[in-house]
Image (tube, helix red, strand yellow):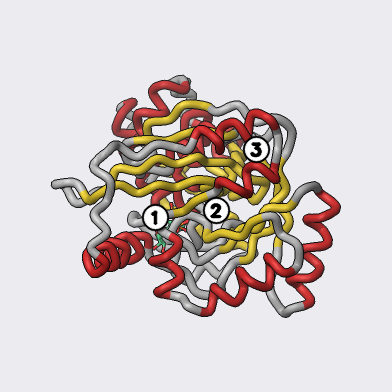
Amino acid sequence: MSEAYASERVHVRAPGKLNLFFEVGGVQEDGYHDVASAYQAVSLYENVWASHSDDFTVTVSGAVDIDGVPADDRNLAVRAARLLAQRIGYRGGVHLDIVKSVPVAGGMGGGSADAAAALVACDALWRADLGTAELHKLAARLGADVPFALMGGTAVGTGRGDQLSPALAKGRFDWVVVPSEEGLSTPEVYAHLDTLRAQHDNGVDARVPEVDPAVLQALRAGDPVALAEHTRNDLQTAALSLRPGLRDVLEIGERAGALAGMVSGSGPTLAFLAGDPESALELQVMLSAAGLKALHVHGPVAGARVVA
Ligand code: ATP
């Protein structure tokens, strides 16, 4: 290994996401649910550095509690690197250094962002040059949210959320996100939703889930007030039932002037929509004064990209 080769490092950052709209259809025969999601990539980033190695190794650190994150082959970023190596017949390995800012098991797709970042970083480090379409195919094999972390921006996802088409969004949307100390398992939230639906016998629509056109219109118009009126998250009831304390936080945010407050994906992170950057700052201050951790982010931002 030459010195230059050994010290070569590729830095990629990839965004966390919010689901502005999330409709969950009935459970399919394979146990998965069909969904319709409007995703927005927001300015809370995972940073991943990839360097040459004989094996596949990973270190994880960051500003968030990383207790639940495996630092071995179970890490989604390592799985992504291995999948890419297999795809291109690369015989070496990689060391991934992950610095996390997205709350773990928070419903903001942090693991998916790490996987997308690893694909982009290894593609560059190994000079594979696979191209967007190929990387997207690999991403879809890793998890429903990984293709969106590659793509970024604002998009509609159908199927399991991985069949993506970009959505037009004008201007910027300001959000305040409130992470929880302890994460929620996505499969557990889905299972709880199925239980609640069975208990209440509110048969899920037989039709294929679809993003409300009013959401897409609000995004195109850059209108946060209209967006606030039409946000929806079918996982919210289940997440709130598993974490009843979140209801109080939603109320605090709404009383503090948020246009809308919602559970992000499977939760427990909450996302509050503000009308503009100044209102978001005020909201952040008020939530912080109530003793909550509150982060001001904005979207849409780009997907996983090499940092020069
Ligand atoms: P999503 O919204 O995509 O369902 P999430 O944001 O709720 O996911 P993640 O932080 O992506 O949750 O992680 C969920 C679980 O995946 C973690 O609890 C952890 O066990 C596992 N995991 C594997 N690799 C990673 C990774 N690189 N970062 C975080 N978690 C990972």
> Which quarter of the figure has residue 102?
bottom right
Answer yes or no: disc 2 within 8 Å of ligand 1. Answer: yes
Question: Which residue is labeled 3 in the image?
Answer: 300
Estimate how packed mark 3 is, as few (under 14), some (14 to 19) or many (20 or more) residues with alpha carbons within 10 Å: many
Answer yes or no: disc 1 within 8 Å of ligand 1. Answer: yes
Toward the right, the furthest residue is 278
Callout 3–callout 2 Cβ contact below 8 Å? no
Residue type for callout 2: Ile
Per the rendering, the mark at residue 98 is: 2
Residue 82 visible in the snapshot:
no
Question: Which residue is labeled 1 in the image?
Answer: 75
Q: CA distance from mark 3 to mark 2?
A: 23 Å
Q: CA distance from mark 1 to mark 3?
A: 27 Å
Please tell me in which quarter of the rendered image ligand 1 is found: bottom left
Residue 230 in percent (x, y) is at 56, 46
Residue 131 in percent (x, y) is at 46, 20
In terms of sequence position, does the residue under pointer 1 or pointer 2 come before the other? 1
Q: Secondary structure at mark 2?
A: strand
Residue 224 in percent (x, y) is at 69, 43
Residue type for callout 1: Asn
Callout 1–callout 2 Cβ contact below 8 Å? yes
Q: Vertical placement of 89 versus 76: above or below?
A: above
Q: Secondary structure at mark 1?
A: loop
Q: Vertical placement of 257 versus 233: above or below?
A: below
Residue drawn at 47 percent across, 34 percent down: 156
Residue drawn at 47 percent across, 69 percent down: 183
Residue 132 visible in the snapshot:
yes
